[in-house]
Image: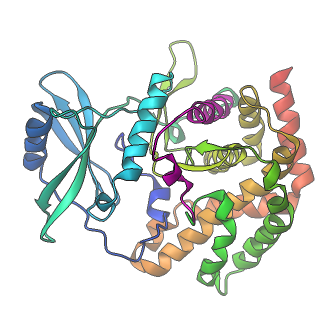
Amino acid sequence: MDRESGFTSRRKVQRVKDKMAEQHAKPKVSQGVAAELMKKHYNLTPSEMRYLPSYDDQNFYVATAEGGQYVLKIMNSEDSKDPTLFELQTYAMAFMHENGLPTQTALRTTTGQDMFLEDMDCGYGLQKYLVRLLTYLPGIPISKVPLSPQLLHKVGQTAARVDNILKEMKHPQLSVLQREGFIWNLSNVLLLEKYMHALDGDPLQEVVKSVLHQYKTFVVPKYASFRKCLIHGDLNDLNLLVQAKESNGHRISGIIDFGDMNISYYVHELAIAIMYMMLEHPEPLEVGGPILAGWESVFPLNEAENDCLFWLVLSRFCQSLVLARYSVTLHPENEEYLMISSKKGITILRRLLEMGKEQVEKIWFQTALQFKN
């Protein structure tokens, strides 16, 4: 999913889906038609509407005469053909909301549905588009505020709470979230080998090969000791919203974008959160400790998970960098936009490798201990 509160994730542009080479039929709906959908299916009258950024779907911010604020989401026609994933994501958001986390929820239609398919012609002929109306979450992306140690600690704590709650979720279609072959699952890092040609002639290729070798020899044998669970899968710096606290600092006010949700491992969620927060911090090495401390205040790592965290963080950097570069080969006209976060990512990845696992872990673990004392 795209930014459901109106912010477009640059990682979304880099996302390599199974059908990436296909031309998705992005909806092109006018505000007038969107207003008609609101009236027809929700019996709500928009008093204010504006377009929100989106990559392959279409989002509208809507304030209604009845007093609510919402995001109207119209999915592209390709993804609309299989609504099961969206049903599960919508169910998960509601489940987490019921358990005290700040997630969006879907407003039911007048016929009691969480979503509906609408036949529309958006310039590609008559096609079906999946439509949802979600609550609007206040706040700004965490990338827009200083990442204090206290806020990073809260990120780790929140990430662990997300997975602990999702662990209890029951749904008859839950097995769909196994998502075999999903390129953004950290279990599938070695699938990057199929895309390495995108780095031909670039010294980065050898760096990535080195990380993949360590993943294969050091991490893979320890998966039997990792604890499995359903994870959000993309707790990046744009998918966490914050608001200023009355006293000082910021609190997390929203968790959005469940498009990468998959059955994976607890430690993957932690590694993903650390990697993305490193991209936004002026001193990336200061990120891991507070997030790790926050995570372990809810869910302590076991020995194998602890031992593999460094290589999993580096592996996520590799996923982001390789798939961004591969996206450029498909869409060279968007190279500047696609590579926005890659330059900093490459610098951080090289630095982590140069310092080595032992030195980086020493910084992370010693900082984490300071929070416990």
Q: What predominant SS class does the magenta segment belong to? A: helix
Q: Quadrant of residue 273?
A: top right
User: Where are the magenta residues, as a range?
Assistant: 152-180
User: Closest to the observer: 185 or 310?
Assistant: 185
Q: Does the magenta stretch include residue 25?
A: no
Q: Can residue 174 be seen in this view?
A: yes
Point out the residue furthest to the top here: 247
Residue 137 image offset from top left, x and y in percent: 37, 30
Indicate left or right for 213 with 254 as reference: right
Residue situated in front as seen by the camera: 177 or 77: 177
Relative placement, left or right, of 89 versus 151 is left
Residue found farthest to the bottom: 201
Quarter-wise, where is residue 229 in the image? top right
Where in the figure is residue 2, as x and y percent of width and height? 39, 51
Residue 32 picture location, percent across and down: 7, 47
Q: In which quarter of the image is the C terminus?
A: top right
Q: Residue at x 71, y 27 (%)?
A: 298
